[in-house]
Image (spheres, coloured by chain):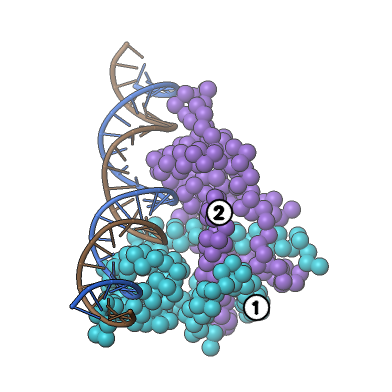
Chain colours: A purple, B cyan, C blue, D brown
Amino acid sequence: MPDLTKQKNAAGKLIEFDMVHHTADEVAHRNHADKNKHPLRFQGQGKILLALSQADGLSQKELATRLNLSVQSTAEFVNKLVKKDLVSKEKSTTDRRKTIIRLTNLGQQTASAETAKVPEFLSGLSDTELDQLTAILTKINNNLYAEIDAASPTETNKFEAVVKDRLRDWFL
Amino acid sequence: MPDLTKQKNAAGKLIEFDMVHHTADEVAHRNHADKNKHPLRFQGQGKILLALSQADGLSQKELATRLNLSVQSTAEFVNKLVKKDLVSKEKSTTDRRKTIIRLTNLGQQTASAETAKVPEFLSGLSDTELDQLTAILTKINNNLYAEIDAASPTETNKFEAVVKDRLRDWFL
DNA sequence: AATTTTAGTCAGGGGGACCTGATTAAAAAA
DNA sequence: TTTTTTAATCAGGTCCCCCTGACTAAAATT
């Protein structure tokens, strides 16, 4: 029987982490007058970038399908990324209806920069703690995959694949 | 000397958690045609709600100052919350320039509902793991408070106080 | 009493995440 | 070849976060 109090403690800390984490990089960006702004989550433009970093050179339609977005939204995000020089568009030669989207160098950097640096807030944790955290998060993430699966069976595999693949280089 | 690989593993899991977590409740809301929509983060309207749940009956100006928002943004968020019947506005009797903002019953419920339920993804973790997670997140959060402090010394106390106070009932 | 400061409001704007509807161009099917 | 399907685009919308500028009403100062 799991101890409810312990669950609540952990849940509270997680919520706190969410808030504090969010605020921390809000504050950070505020001070640095950052060009790159926010971290690009798994949403909108960031979603596109992440998907491309796993499978570059997809068509817009492909992207839309994989990411569960309308083709119009996808086009919008892609265009925004083009303006930021993170991806490029080019007509397919084999099927001239299609537009192939590719990461630019900058786009690749950006996509991996997301995950490239170990956040400072992990410093001060012992090796043991890091191992524990990793193990626990693995469980939690699996629970979340299961939740996603329950709610929307069709897209799970796609999603899980994208995420895990994106993060694969972290776990070598 | 901290093991870089272990840090990377943990960092990767944390990023994965972020993505998966986000997607999980995105999917959840999509299916349930949810009225309450998104979880109200420490941002915009959610920020206001959280601040009020710590100190009810503030003036708009007070809110703006504490939350580091322009008075206009604050007014916007407050008005939206009024429409949702989560807060109420009333003119101060002692200083008729001021508008006092108060949580409605619904607002109080909503603010605590945020933190009221233990997320399902914590199920399956043992008591030991929960304790470990709590301890680790405590360290991480403290690191983040320190980061915020470094970047913006003036607002730390305010922020940390709001957050901790908000979450106090979790840790009794 | 006249001036200045303060708390709010309105108007307008920039970005972001998404969507539906209508239309075009190119490929595939009939 | 004509029709249908497919990949994109344009147009227009909804809602969110957040800001500056201009202006009013009510206090605090002078």
Foreground residue, B52 or B9? B52
Residue at x-position 72% and y-position 71%? A124
Image disc number at residue B163: none
In this view, C1 is above or below A58:
below
Give the image location of residue A169, x and y in percent: 69, 50
**What residue does disc 1 label?**
B135
Q: Is residue A127 visible?
A: yes
- The amino acid type of the residue labelled 1 equals Ala
Which x, y percent locates residue B44? 40, 65
At x 54%, y 55%, the residue is A33
Whole-percent x, y for residue B158 in the image: 50, 77
Q: Crowding near pointer 1: few (<14 within 10 Å), some, many (20+)?
A: some
**From what the image shows, is residue A107 above or below residue A167?**
above
Looking at the image, which residue is at 48% across and 31% down?
A99
Q: Are marks 1 and 2 on the same chain?
A: no
Q: Which residue is mark 2?
A: A34
